[in-house]
Image: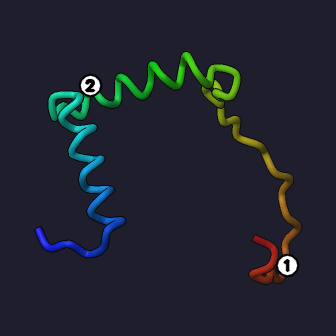
Amino acid sequence: MKSDSPIVDEVRQRRSEVSARFGDDLDRYVKHLMELQEKTYRARLVGQIAVVPVERPARPPGPRSTLDE
């Protein structure tokens, strides 16, 4: 593969090392990241957010501008 710059070469090298560490298995790598996140950053995690629909009052009849939306 053609080298773009030393930084790109380093990123590719590190990507290859990480991939090899997890046996080229993306699922294993993601599982590792999720476990690390749970242990290290537990206080920063946000739980599931429920989206609740809000009823808006009816608009009176008449001309509307695009700013009303």
Q: Nearer the viewer, residue 14 or 56?
A: 14
Report the disc number at residue 25: none
Report the disc number at residue 28: 2
- Residue at the (88%, 67%) spot, across then down: 60
- C-alpha span from label 2 to label 1: 59 Å
Q: Position of residue 39 (x, y in %)?
A: 55, 16
Amino acid marked by disc 1: Gly
Q: Nearer the viewer, residue 4 or 27?
A: 4
What secondary structure is found at the residue carrying circle 2? helix
Which residue does the numbered mark 1 point to in the structure image?
Answer: 62
Q: Earlier in the sequence, mark 2 or mark 1?
A: 2
Q: Position of residue 28 (x, y in %)?
A: 26, 25
Quadrant assignment, res 53 = top right
Quadrant position of the N terminus in the picture:
bottom left
- Residue at the (31%, 57%) spot, across then down: 10
**Picture colour scheme:** rainbow
Seen in the picture, residue 19 relative to 28 is either above or below; the reply is below
